[in-house]
């Protein structure tokens, strides 16, 4: 009988089976059309939210889906879920991804949301608890160390650096998670311009349907239950895990939940990666450039 892990080693073992090498190989070999849209933030940085925005814009607000990844499929997991990711109901085609710029198939258009790394880690801990580990068994400090030590190319800092380096490309659009919280209509309008949706009504509907209240009222359509059903047994996880994604996250809410030692470790990691490479003092400096590009 499958049991949920109770330590970080168990989480790593379960995740090692989540995606097959064959499935990833097919994703990396995908040939995009020029109008294809890839929503590719790091995990827990606004991916589902942006999927909903893009889908709402391209369809004028269609909500006739079981779960959002049915209509905006996860490129890297499509093969393992036995989905034809190209068989989409609307144009432009849209795909979820967590790949960095260096690995994602080139030739489409790319939307990425960046978020404070501690907030992303705390959100990931809450998301994994009850799905990839037994509730109450892995504390936030241990999980923070796991988040910090993730493999090269699969961690927050490598992902953010890869997209920051190409942020001025015409086919790349970056947002901060915090701006999505504070000025959603502005974000939706910029996405609409980027993917070629001119209709004012589609923009209004997409904005309304990307609100927290709207998505929370339809939480089952955004909770990854299709992914869970397809991959839990392979990962050695019992069925019925909690996979809720619609959480009213607050910018900066993660820091009070962790120790000063964790904050210092995250700051050190920032300094030797994004700080050293781009001269960004911290996440606040990155966000300031995204939100006020003329200051850069």
Image (tube, helix red, strand yellow):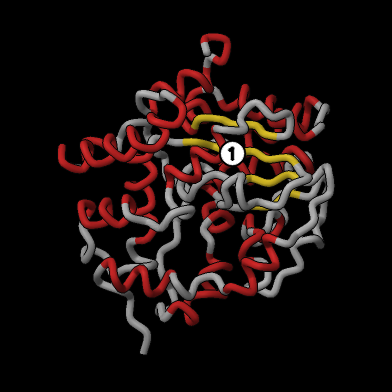
* Crowding at mark 1 (Cα within 10 Å: few <14, some 14-19, many 20+): many
Q: Residue furthest top?
A: 295
Toward the viewer: 257 or 199? Answer: 257
User: Residue shown at 33%/61% (left/top)?
Assistant: 129
Percent coordinates x, y for residue 121 in the rendering: 35, 47
Q: Report helix, strand or loop for mark 1.
A: strand
Q: In the displayed structure, does residue 45 sit left or right of residue 143?
A: right
Percent coordinates x, y for residue 24 in the rendering: 62, 66
Q: Quadrant of the N terminus?
A: bottom left
Percent coordinates x, y for residue 16 in the rendering: 44, 72
**Count of numbered tags:** 1
User: Residue shown at 42%/33% (left/top)?
Assistant: 274
Q: Which residue is mark 1?
A: 112
User: Residue shown at 36%/69% (left/top)?
Assistant: 12
Q: Residue furthest left?
A: 260
Toward the viewer: 213 or 114? Answer: 114
User: Residue shown at 54%/44% (left/top)?
Assistant: 41
Q: In the displayed structure, does residue 8 sit left or right of residue 155?
A: left
- Residue 185, placed above or below residue 70: above
- Residue 248, placed above or below residue 288: below
Toward the viewer: 243 or 178? Answer: 178
Percent coordinates x, y for residue 153 in the rendering: 48, 53
- Residue 127, placed above or below residue 5: above
Toward the viewer: 165 or 222? Answer: 165
Q: In the displayed structure, does residue 206 sit left or right of residue 196?
A: left
């Amino acid at each position: 009988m499958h049991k949920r892990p109770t330590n970080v080693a168990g989480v790593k073992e379960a995740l090692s089976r989540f995606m097959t090498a064959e499935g990833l190989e097919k994703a990396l070999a995908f040939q995009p059309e020029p109008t294809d849209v890839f929503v590719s933030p790091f995990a827990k940085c606004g991916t589902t939210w942006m999927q909903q925005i893009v889908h709402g814009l391209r369809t004028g607000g269609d909500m006739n889906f079981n779960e959002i990844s049915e209509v905006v499929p996860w490129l890297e997991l499509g093969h393992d879920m036995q989905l034809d990711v190209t068989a989409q109901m609307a144009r432009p085609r849209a795909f979820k991804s967590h790949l960095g710029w260096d690995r994602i198939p080139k030739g489409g258009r790319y939307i990425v949301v960046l978020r404070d790394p501690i907030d992303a880690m705390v959100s990931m801990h809450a998301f994994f608890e009850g799905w990839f580990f037994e509730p109450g068994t892995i504390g936030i400090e241990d999980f923070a160390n796991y988040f910090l030590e993730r493999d090269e190319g699969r961690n927050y800092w490598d992902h953010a650096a890869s997209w920051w380096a190409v942020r001025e490309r015409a086919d790349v659009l970056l947002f901060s998670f915090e701006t999505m919280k504070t000025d959603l209509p502005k974000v939706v309008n910029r996405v609409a311009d980027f993917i070629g949706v001119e209709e004012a009504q589609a923009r209004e509907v997409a904005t309304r349907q990307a609100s927290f209240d709207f998505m929370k009222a339809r939480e089952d359509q955004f909770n990854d239950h299709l992914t869970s059903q397809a991959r839990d047994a392979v990962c050695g996880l019992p069925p019925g895990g909690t996979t809720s994604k619609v959480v009213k996250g607050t910018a900066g809410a993660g820091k009070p939940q962790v120790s000063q030692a964790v904050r210092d470790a995250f700051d050190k990691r920032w300094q030797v990666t994004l700080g050293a490479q781009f001269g960004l003092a911290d996440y606040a400096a990155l966000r300031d450039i995204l939100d006020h590009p003329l200051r850069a």
